[in-house]
């Protein structure tokens, strides 16, 4: 968009850049000053800037520990009241830092920008944002600073978006104001073929498609909150992941922009390998095999916003009657509330038993188009078999092949698959 700046009386390109700084990047006021340099740089090049920040350093973890001291079972509403306060500190300090450097700035809590969510405390979902409040401040030449991670219900209760949720705030704000890009500044320099702390030969990717990133992030690639990537995919917001203290190229995540490094377009390439720990498996056995049963099972989970991963159904015949077995994976965190939900559910659908198994990890091979190429799956299964790793479940989609394995095999599987698909940096 070309617009005329009243004050400067000149023509230049005005686009909005959203910049998100994570907890490590704003761990001290000194570090905030370094983040502010990124803001000033974008301002100097004529962009309007909206900043989203997380709580300083390990603040949120400290609040979680305090809550555990206060109660064995703190209410989720009070958890959110507590956890959301960390971001309030960092937005105010960030505004002061910018002002002290001569850049007018104003901070906002979720309530002030109408960042409304549903009322699922500790994992609320964003419903709407009042972009005008932010745009008005930008028009006045200010940098707007938005508290990450928090939201507010229609009733006025404070919510949070789930741990690591500031990324989601940033992308949602970027979508709401129509920003050109959402820059996520963090303590790593981009998205890697796999977690470099676990596999030292992992390589930084220049570009990743939003769909691939969705798979990598939800499978625990760590760099970005999965829901942030979902938002980016839904609203077509490009994300640029960058190191907050260095001036590296980072990784660009954009729709349809899959990794084509060194490859021909038709060649099927694996982009990365992800490992997700802390998974449990719920199995419902001997449930009626009639239309509507699966719908009821998943409606009852959805009602409680329990996020389920891979779902597998098989049908067996018992005493001449067809019975179904449905199993699905969930994060360990979801299991504490699961038992009563399952009991009520089995009662409702008229029979069956439920089992909960813990101690799984999931390793996924991700790449655009690989799901429909049997060689990828066969290379994967062969490599795991040669290493004596047993596969508990298999799931595939257009862009990934995932296997559920024992958690003790997780890191070993990750490195050997990274190697098997030749993803490591070539030795120099
Ligand atoms: N401060 C929150 C957390 O530590 C949100 C975030 O960092 O994104 O989970
Ligand atoms: Mg954090």
Image (spheres, rainbow, N blue to C red):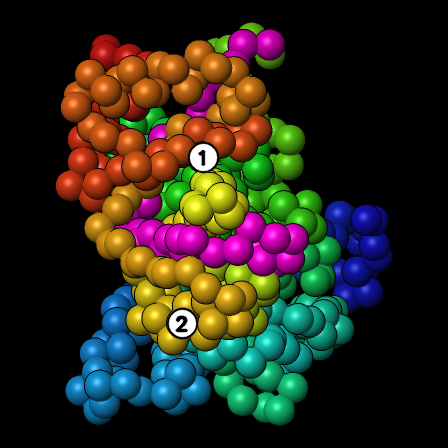
Is the distance from the Cβ of mark 1 to the nearest ligand 1 atom less than 8 Å?
Answer: no
* Residue visible at 26% across and 72% down in the picture: 61
Q: Label 2 vs label 1: CA separation?
A: 27 Å
Q: Is residue 299 above or below residue 78?
A: above
Front one among 386 and 244 = 386
For residue 187, the mark is none
Q: Residues within 10 Å of mark 1 (few under 14, many from 20)?
A: some
Dividing the picture into quadrants, the one containing residue 81 is bottom left
Q: Secondary structure at mark 1?
A: strand
Report how many numbered discs are placed on residues in the image.
Answer: 2
Residue 191 screen position, x and y as percent: 40, 37
Residue 192 left/right relative to 135: left
- Write down the region rendered in magenta: 266-295
Magenta-drawn stretch contains 276: yes
Q: Is residue 44 above or below residue 118?
A: above
The residue that mark 1 highlights is 395
Front one among 360 and 217 = 360
* Residue visible at 54% across and 89% down in the picture: 157
Q: Are marks 2 and 1 in contact (CB under 8 Å)?
A: no
Is the distance from the Cβ of mark 2 to the nearest ligand 1 atom less than 8 Å?
Answer: no
The residue that mark 2 highlights is 343
């Amino acid at each position: 968009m070309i617009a005329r700046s009243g004050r400067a009386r000149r023509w230049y390109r005005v686009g909005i850049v959203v910049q998100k700084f994570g907890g490590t990047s704003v761990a001290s006021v000194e570090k905030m000053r370094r983040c502010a340099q990124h803001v000033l740089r974008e301002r100097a090049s004529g962009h309007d800037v909206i900043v989203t920040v997380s709580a300083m350093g390990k603040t949120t973890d400290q609040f979680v520990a305090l809550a555990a001291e206060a109660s064995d079972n703190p209410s989720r509403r009070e958890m959110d009241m507590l956890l959301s306060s960390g971001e309030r500190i960092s937005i105010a300090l960030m505004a002061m830092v910018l002002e002290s450097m001569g850049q007018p700035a104003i901070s906002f809590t979720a309530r002030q920008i109408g960042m409304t969510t549903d009322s699922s405390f500790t994992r609320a979902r964003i419903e709407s944002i009042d972009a005008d409040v932010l745009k008005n401040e930008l028009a006045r030449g200010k940098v707007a600073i938005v508290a990450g991670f928090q939201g507010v219900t229609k009733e006025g209760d404070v919510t949070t978006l789930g741990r690591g949720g500031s990324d989601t705030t940033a992308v949602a704000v970027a979508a709401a104001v129509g920003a050109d890009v959402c820059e996520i500044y963090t303590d790593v320099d981009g998205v890697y073929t796999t977690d470099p702390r676990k596999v030292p030969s992992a390589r930084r990717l220049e570009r990743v498609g939003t769909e691939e990133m969705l798979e990598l992030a939800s499978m625990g690639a760590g760099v970005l909150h999965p829901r942030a990537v979902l938002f980016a995919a839904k609203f077509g917001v490009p994300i640029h992941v960058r190191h907050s203290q260095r001036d590296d190229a980072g990784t660009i995540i954009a729709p349809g922009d899959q990794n084509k490094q060194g490859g021909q377009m038709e060649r099927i390439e694996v982009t990365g390998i992800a490992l997700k720990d802390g998974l449990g498996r719920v199995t419902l056995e001997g449930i009626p095999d009639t239309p509507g049963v699966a719908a009821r099972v998943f409606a009852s989970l959805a009602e409680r916003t329990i996020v389920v991963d891979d779902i597998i159904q098989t049908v067996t015949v018992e005493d001449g009657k067809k019975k179904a077995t449905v199993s699905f994976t969930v994060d360990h965190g979801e299991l504490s509330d699961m038992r009563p939900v399952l009991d009520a559910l089995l009662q409702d659908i008229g029979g069956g038993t439920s089992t909960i198994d813990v101690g799984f990890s999931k390793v996924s091979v991700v790449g655009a188009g690989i799901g429909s190429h049997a060689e990828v799956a066969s290379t994967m299964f062969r490599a795991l078999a040669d290493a004596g790793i047993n596969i508990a479940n298999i799931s595939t989609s257009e862009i990934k092949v995932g296997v559920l394995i024992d958690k003790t095999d997780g890191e070993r599987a990750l490195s050997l698959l990274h190697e098997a698909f030749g993803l490591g940096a070539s030795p120099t």
